[in-house]
Amino acid sequence: MKYIELTIEFKELDPWRDIFVAELAEFGFESFVETKTGLLGYIQESLYKPDMIEVLLKNDATASHSIQTIAEQNWNAEWEKNFDPVFVDSKLAIVAPFHEKPIGFEQTITIMPKMSFGTGHHQTTWLMSQRLFELDLQNKDVLDMGTGTGILAILAEKLGARSVFAPDIDQWSYENAIENVEHNFCKKIEVVLGGDSLIANKFFHIIIANINKNVLIQHFSVYSSSLLFDGIMLISGFFETDKEDLIREAEKHGFIFDNVFTKEGWALIQFIKK
């Protein structure tokens, strides 16, 4: 499988880099690397259409951009050049196999960084990781929808979850998540390939979904059917400015707004099922 690498240089990084990440994710870009002056975005070659991002790239915020096709086998070397450890307060360290293991953290997770979303660098994955430490996951059944690298599923097991169901629609993410689950010696995570239809007739105490706004809205009815009463739903993957729309839509499906957490313009919303 080949990927398209989009390189963007910005005249000003803030807030444009975050805005472009959200917009490109809507177009199907799967992974991002932040550079000192811009952004690298990756999308499967079969999904890329030049006209779909033409308007976006004409934005006055961009200084320049370029496109190139990269082979699958080049990806690990590219990540190793750009992948730094991630620290979530003093609670969680997210490292790659080529990093030295840090000390002084409650949990350490090793992620093989490939073409999957969720290495912990993005604000939404960081928010999700931080919030999971504040929940009681002991003996809970958890859904990690759109698991990506599997990092949140892995953290949920390490924090005491009884079971974690971890679907993803992307073949690459599915394979990467399985690899990461095995590398972290997890035994209670079921990684599956597919979408929201896979959770029909399954029930969870906690649902975590770090996707994008439009997909979340489409999934609310399914999440409502699968989340047990008094269960908790955490959603992220969107800008703080989108929170009112998402709260309004979630409440139509029986979710009660509980709290919102933000980081650098991105948001996580916590709901309770009533």
Image: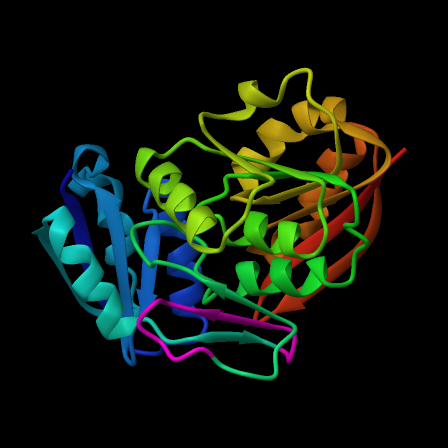
Q: In the image, is residue 220 above or below residue 58?
A: above
Count of numbered tags? 0
Residue 124 position (above or below residue 149) = below
Tell me the residue at 49%/81% (across/down).
Answer: 102
Residue 237 shows in the view: no
Image position, residue 81 (x, y; %) = 22, 73
Asked if the magenta segment contains residue 95, the reply would be: yes
Q: Quadrant of residue 110?
A: bottom left
Residue 43 belongs to the span the image colors magenta = no
> In this image, 23 relative to 143: left or right?
left
Q: Is residue 221 left or right of residue 77?
A: right
- Classified by dominant secondary structure, the portion drawn in magenta counts as loop
- Image coordinates of residue 82 in percent, x first then y, are 28, 72
127 up-or-down from 245: above or below: below
Q: Residue at x 69, y 15 (%)?
A: 201
Report the residue at 29% width, 61% height from top: 59
- Can you tell which quarter of the image residue 33 is in? bottom left
Q: Position of residue 100 (x, y in %)?
A: 39, 80
Q: Is residue 98 visible?
A: yes
Q: Position of residue 109 (x, y in %)?
A: 51, 63
Q: Which residues are magenta?
A: 89-101
Q: Residue at x 33, y 59 (%)?
A: 113
